[in-house]
Image (cartoon, helix red, strand yellow):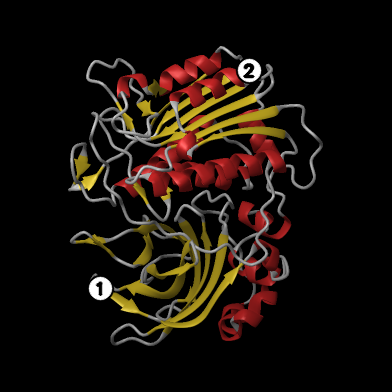
Amino acid sequence: MNEKSGCRYFRQFCLRYFAAGFFVFLVLGFGLKAFGQSYFYFENKITPPGKSPLTYYTFLTLANNGSGIARVRYVDPASGEKRLLEVGLLDSTDISQGIQNPDHYLIPDGEPLPILATTIDGFHAPRILFKKEKAGENLYYLPINIEYHLPDGTWISSEMLVNQQKSATGLRDETDLVRVFYNESDDIFNDILYQTGNTGQRGSLPRRKEKLYLISVANTVDKVIGETTKIDLDKVTGTFTKLAADMNMEIQVYKISGPSLSIKAVESALAGIRPTAIDIVVFYYSGHGFRYTDDKSLYPRMSLRLNKDADLGKNNLGLESVSKMLLKKKARVTLCVSDCCNSDVGVTAPLGPDPLVVKDPPGYQPQINAYLVAQLFFPEKPVSILIGSADKYQVAVGNPDLGGYFTHSFTSEMRNVLYGSGSNVTWLSLLANTRAKATRLSLSAPCKGDGPCVNNRRLQSARFEVSK
């Protein structure tokens, strides 16, 4: 490993760093698997009160769900020790008096972890400020500064010396930069530089015999939630269409939305598919959901009426009932998902703020990890997955620029995992991560109307079952 080759990025730092000779990476960390969609390199200078200036060199891996890992190099001014630390970061969405803050912070999540350091004393934890931008219909955030935490609890702004977004493709031509922050044994190093991961098969794949059947249903004409459900529909359809294309397998899509939404159309699609014993069936719904007081199922009913004057009792289907219908077709994988309220009829969910989303870096072309896809979608024995975005008597929160929080979290987690460098995944682990992310997002929404709240914030916790 040629550690000195990274010196062209911060020459003065490297001259000091290598003056004492070689160093050894300690292979520690938060267990990061390199599924970040975006990479950033920063150089920031701060001058704490009464102290000498200090420069931090930061490599940020940011996943498309708003979580991140920052590796930070610096020279401790008191001891002269050359340090490398790792900091977990989470998106912090701020609402003040019902008005959404146009900016976002990535804030520290837990204590910094020393990778190369005898102590973390004197380290100033970072929080990264992002500015909201919009290009056409696309909403995204750009990093504009890093602030650092002082011992008295205040934050000090820094001078941004370098602010660069990187892509995995571009970083393969900048291996010296990556080596300054990561060891060659780290998963992220291999994922960035070689796009291989540990066991994931990449590149062109042979044609698969399995077929994927997708029934995607959304109430896109509703005046209240139509904007969010349209985004949900596009995300889910796009996610599974890309998955099928990257796995080189056939997909049949039945999209029911707009004025075509009806219980008859959904029942016709459910009855019409003919999967074999090796195929995959996915049912997805985004729209209004509810439950009756005497409902025994813990999962919601899906409203399939366009006109509120229509008889709701004759124009709904229970999610669990749909799952049972599809299980009779005996596909290898049966996945039923709803993103809707699971509360009394007439309860309206509040809209929440949009979470941190960044632009795809230039040259971003993720390659699928076929090994992990096989663990989820090509199991040895049949598996059934049933997912409701909101538990009993909860509402489903979303944002008109982002869609439903659960759908956003689910599709993001699917991409993170299936296009990452990991070697093991289960439906339970994927859905547990999805639920945690969606719940955290829901807590950014103000508590209005009925349903559970925490500290005057809305609480939404998905319910799911995985059965073999």
Give the residue displayed 53% in from the left and 64% down from the top: 359
* Residue drawn where x is 40% and y is 86% of the image: 53
Q: Nearer the viewer, residue 241 or 8?
A: 241
**Element class at badge 2:** loop
Q: Amino acid at mark 2?
A: Lys
Image quarter of residue 393: top left
Q: Nearer the viewer, residue 421 or 29?
A: 421
User: Where does the image place residue 345, in percent across and percent down from the top left?
Assistant: 24, 29
- Residue 462 lies left or right of residue 185; in this view the side is left
Residue found 28% across the figure and 85% down from its top? 49
Residue at 42% in and 59% down:
356
Give the answer, above or below, for where 70 lies relative to 452.
Answer: below
Q: Is 66 on the left or on the right of 41, as rendered?
A: left
The percent coordinates of residue 102 (x first, y second) are 33, 67
Mark 1 element type: loop
On residue 381, which mark appears?
2
Q: Quadrant of residue 377?
A: top right
Query: As displayed, is residue 153 above or below residue 311?
Result: below
Type of amino acid under label 1: Thr
Give the label on residue 154, or none. Answer: 1
Residue 103: x and y in percent read 35, 68
Please identify the residue farthest to the top as the structure is shown: 328
